Amino acid sequence: MQIHIVRQGETVTSIAAQYGVEPGIITRYNGLQPPYFLAVGQALAIFFPLQTAIVQSGDTLYSLAARYGASILELFRLNPQLGGSALLRPGETIVLALERQPIRETQLYGYAYPFANPQVLGGILPYSRYFVPFTYGIGADGGLLALDDEALLLLARQYDVTPLLHLSTLTEDGSFSSERAARLLGAAERWQTVADAVFSQIEMRGYGGLDVDFEFLGAENAEAYAQFLGFLRPQVNARNMELFAALAPKTSGDQKGVLYEGHDYGAIAENTDAVLLMTYEWGYTYGPPLAVSPLPSVKRVLDYAVTQIPPEKIFMGFSNYGYDWPLPYRRGETRARSISNVYAAALAASVGAEIEFDETAQAPFFRYTAEDGIAHEVWFEDARSCMARLPLVAQYGFRGVGVWNYMRPFPVLFALAYWMFDI
């Protein structure tokens, strides 16, 4: 695999000729769509197939898998253009093997709302070990809020992925409620009632584990939250399942802020089987333009985390999105638009912007002026930022990567994860 940075005048065809691969190999792994315009400065991951097959009339993905001794999931991973669909077109090139030297095993998981596009999920779930429909919140009456998760669970079964029930303090209006969390955590006699409701849904709907995400708890709820997780874990494990928990991105034990103070890394790690470090959102909707997951900030969180949590319990968070800020930025007024990483690169190409790369943050960005005359600044992820962060899983000895979220296509992230690891 090589990363190519697009220069002025280059096209997919000319780049493919330079590396001796078919143009379709470049488009499929980088999520490029017709008419395949490229931006100067755009990063493209160039993968090298070791074996391919041309689809003949009458071929199916199942017949190709049987003929070449491959699994269906492996063919989905090797051919992201299929989007997890077994439909083939005569004349289409199917990759059967890719040049790669995986450095170790790893696991991927991610989240999706019920309205997620099934085709997008179909392109991602073949790489996944776990899948988390978002979310079962806690209602005003203390019971679970309903989630229309049947379609997502059907997809999980289709791609042989373990679904985790997601328990959070998200309310009917879509915000995390510190008050509802405090009400539950402060009444230990209610914990079993909530647990019974959770396990009823797990058993009825076919979930394979539990993922808990209580945010904005404040220091006053930190101890009770860790105890609540410790109350749940033996009941989860007794069902031969695991308990996960999401953690705010802390860099020290005494870090101030209602988001951070409610999460005692050591205590939560002791009472769970795995944790997700939410290493993203330094650049966010209402903040100034900057990288969503700048590498130095991510590493500060990781460096602190491994002093409190066994690395083999940690999933490193990965941001599958970017932001487009109108300029000038005005604190309290400016609101960035959340966009996909694939769309960000296509936007740069469509407006003729040159993509730059911040070597410190290890993240791409560009600026452009919209048709209404308003200037914009965009930060997102690309092959380079993926290659700056994915190796950290091996360097720190983490269990894997947790992606927020699976709602948007980003083929190069998953192709690079497959190239680097045994999924």
Image (spheres, grey):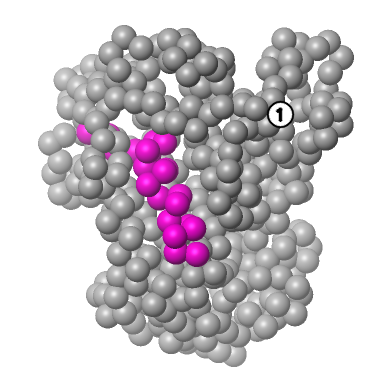
Instruction: Give the extent of the magenta segment.
Output: 377-397
- Residue 215: x and y in percent read 42, 68
Q: Residue at x 69, y 25 (%)?
A: 51
Q: Is residue 152 above or below residue 394?
A: above
When asked about the image quadrant of residue 40, the answer is top left
Q: Main secondary structure of the magenta part?
A: helix
Which secondary structure lies at badge 1? strand
Depth order, front residue of 71/170: 71
The answer to whether residue 318 is seen in the rendering is no
Q: Residue 73, image x and y in percent?
A: 73, 39
Which residue in the protein does label 1 denote?
96
Identified by mark 1, the residue type is Leu
Give the residue at x 41% y 31%: 3
Front residue of 423/51: it is 51
The image shows residue 6 at horizontal and vertical percentages of 34, 21
Left or right relative to 60: residue 112: left
Closer to us: 191 or 12: 12
Q: How many marks?
A: 1
